[in-house]
Image (cartoon, rainbow, N blue to C red):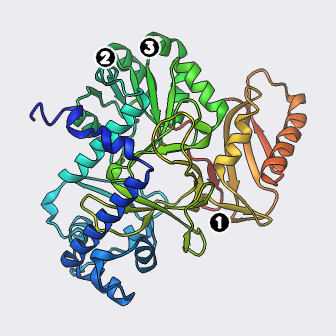
């Protein structure tokens, strides 16, 4: 592996970084989209037939509106479950390669989601895809250090996402190496106390993992964290840092700033600034993937404007996969105005996931919203809770049932009043009144991977 391969400067382009969320980058997006659609129409007959059926005769001059109208939106898990293939016996790797118009041997990493909510979504990465990931990662690192490349070079990464198949796991390790950083690949599979020991012995100073694991490390051994002397956390894969109380616990426990991040696969890079993180994460990959919004129910395009809300929709402008409109299922709100922090990129706040939506008396509620209310009652609650569903959602017969851990030192005679306070807060903020079952501290299972907030009694 050459020194040139493992070098931050190979993948970082400051000019493109500064162009994010500008008229200049929007012109570049359209140029790339037209070139890409034209290229894939020649490689993939199915895409050409799709555009022909919608009356798009000149892919090289297609507009964004024509593209969104012609190419139907697919939810990622649905797309993974129904991949077309000319060979009925083809495996998923062969099918993905056929869709991309490449050979299966062109892939370098074969990863996927866990498939806990259905068919696993594949993350099959070519050398080009890995290069795009490195570009996105360098932008994120440049963003969080305010452009201090010497600070970046001093990072020693504790890679604590699940290494087994997860997109942020082994692909994340490879991406950090490509950016020239040393990586400690403990993964979420390692026991938390052992992770802390390794982090201290190996001199880790950049945490890369889920916020729930970061919280768990604080609960296990806060004194060890003080000795390790972390400089920064980059957290993702689940809600957490959006909640002020959880962010404060993590930043106080680690003694350093925490960045809310999303992306990696496909070169996507979103991350929060330190000053105005409540307004969402800055998007730093306008030249790599085009983003638009869709109505969660009708799947029709939603106008792109400040404050708009809808399903997040991705279209790759580079990489191995064809230019199709795919949604990971996230419901988001966008801020198109420039951030007061002065850093580039429009911003996005994740409200919830389409498959986590609950409707109580017609009111739409997401677990992350419930999480925020419960966490605001810390330390009278531990912040740990479960939503109990007796029947499949999204419709929930009221009242919504919650199991909540009360905090250390809270007396039994105080619980009724506390339940009333929480119920009133949820009514004020979410228009629901839950039924609360109290549990002692540390009753609910802690997760080193993604925290499971819904308990399904009907399964």
Q: From the viewer's perspective, is residue 397 above or below residue 256?
A: below
**Disc 2 and disc 3 in contact, CB within 8 angstroms:** no
Q: Earlier in the sequence, mark 2 or mark 3?
A: 2
Q: From the viewer's perspective, is residue 419 above or below residue 289?
A: above
The percent position of residue 285, horizontal first and vertical second, equals 38, 49
338 horizontally vs 188: left or right = right
Q: Nearer the viewer, residue 209 or 61?
A: 61
Residue at image x 64%, y 37%? 243
Q: Which residue is mark 1?
A: 392
Q: Nearer the viewer, residue 169 or 152?
A: 152
Point out the image quarter for the C terminus. bottom right
Q: From the viewer's perspective, is residue 82 above or below residue 22?
A: below
Q: Secondary structure at mark 2?
A: helix
Residue 173 falls in image quadrant: top left
The percent position of residue 40, horizontal first and vertical second, equals 23, 73
Q: From the viewer's perspective, is residue 255 above or below residue 349?
A: above
Q: Which residue is mark 3?
A: 229
Q: Nearer the viewer, mark 3 or mark 1?
A: 3
Q: Which residue is mark 2?
A: 202
Q: CA distance from mark 2 to mark 1?
A: 46 Å
The percent position of residue 433, horizontal first and vertical second, equals 84, 52
Q: Nearer the viewer, residue 432 or 389?
A: 432
Q: Nearer the viewer, residue 131 or 275?
A: 275
Q: Residue furthest left?
A: 2
Q: CA distance from mark 2 to mark 3?
A: 12 Å
Q: Nearer the viewer, mark 2 or mark 1?
A: 2
Residue 87 falls in image quadrant: bottom left
Query: Does residue 189 show up?
Result: no
234 horizontally vs 179: left or right = right
453 horizontally vs 41: left or right = right
Residue at image x 40%, y 75%? 67
The percent position of residue 51, horizontal first and vertical second, equals 34, 83
């Amino acid at each position: 592996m050459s020194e040139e391969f493992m070098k931050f400067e190979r993948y970082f382009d400051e000019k493109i970084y500064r162009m994010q969320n500008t008229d200049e980058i929007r012109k570049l997006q359209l140029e790339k989209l037209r070139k890409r659609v034209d290229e894939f129409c020649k490689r993939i007959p199915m895409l050409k037939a799709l555009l022909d059926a919608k009356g798009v005769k000149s892919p090289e001059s297609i507009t964004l509106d024509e593209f969104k109208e012609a190419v139907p939106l697919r939810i990622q898990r649905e797309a993974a479950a129904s991949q077309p293939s000319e060979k009925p016996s083809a495996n998923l790797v062969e099918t993905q390669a056929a869709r991309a118009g490449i050979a299966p041997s062109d892939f370098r990493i074969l990863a996927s989601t866990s498939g806990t909510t259905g068919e696993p979504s594949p993350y099959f990465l070519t050398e080009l895809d890995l290069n795009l990931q490195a570009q996105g990662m360098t932008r994120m690192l440049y963003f969080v250090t305010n452009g201090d490349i010497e600070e970046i070079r001093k990072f020693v990464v504790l890679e604590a996402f699940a290494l087994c198949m997860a997109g942020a796991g082994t692909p994340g390790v490879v991406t950090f190496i490509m950016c020239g950083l040393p990586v400690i690949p403990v993964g979420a599979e390692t026991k938390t106390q052992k992770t802390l020991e390794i982090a201290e012995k190996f001199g880790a100073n950049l945490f890369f993992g889920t916020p729930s694991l970061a919280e768990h490390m604080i609960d296990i051994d806060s004194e060890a964290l003080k000795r390790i002397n972390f400089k920064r956390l980059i957290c993702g894969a689940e809600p957490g840092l959006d909640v002020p109380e959880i962010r404060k616990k993590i930043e106080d426990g680690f003694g350093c700033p925490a960045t809310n991040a999303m992306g990696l696969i496909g070169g996507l890079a979103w991350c929060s600034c330190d000053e105005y993180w409540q307004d969402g994460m800055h998007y730093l990959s306008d030249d790599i993937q085009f983003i638009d919004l869709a109505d969660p129910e009708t799947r029709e395009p939603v106008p792109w404007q400040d404050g708009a809300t809808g399903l997040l929709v991705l279209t790759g402008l580079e990489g191995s996969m064809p230019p199709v409109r795919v949604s990971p299922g996230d419901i988001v709100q966008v801020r198109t105005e420039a951030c007061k922090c002065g850093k580039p990129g429009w911003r996005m706040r994740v409200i919830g996931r389409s498959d986590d939506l609950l409707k109580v008396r017609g009111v739409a509620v997401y677990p992350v919203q419930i999480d925020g209310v419960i966490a605001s009652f810390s330390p009278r609650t531990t912040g740990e809770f479960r939503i109990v569903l007796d029947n499949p959602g999204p419709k929930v017969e009221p009242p919504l049932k919650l199991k909540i851990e009360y905090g250390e030192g809270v007396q039994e005679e105080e619980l009724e009043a506390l339940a009333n306070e929480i119920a009133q807060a949820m009514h004020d903020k979410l228009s629901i009144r839950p039924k609360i079952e109290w549990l002692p501290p540390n009753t609910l299972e802690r997760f080193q991977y993604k925290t499971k907030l819904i308990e399904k009694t009907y399964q």
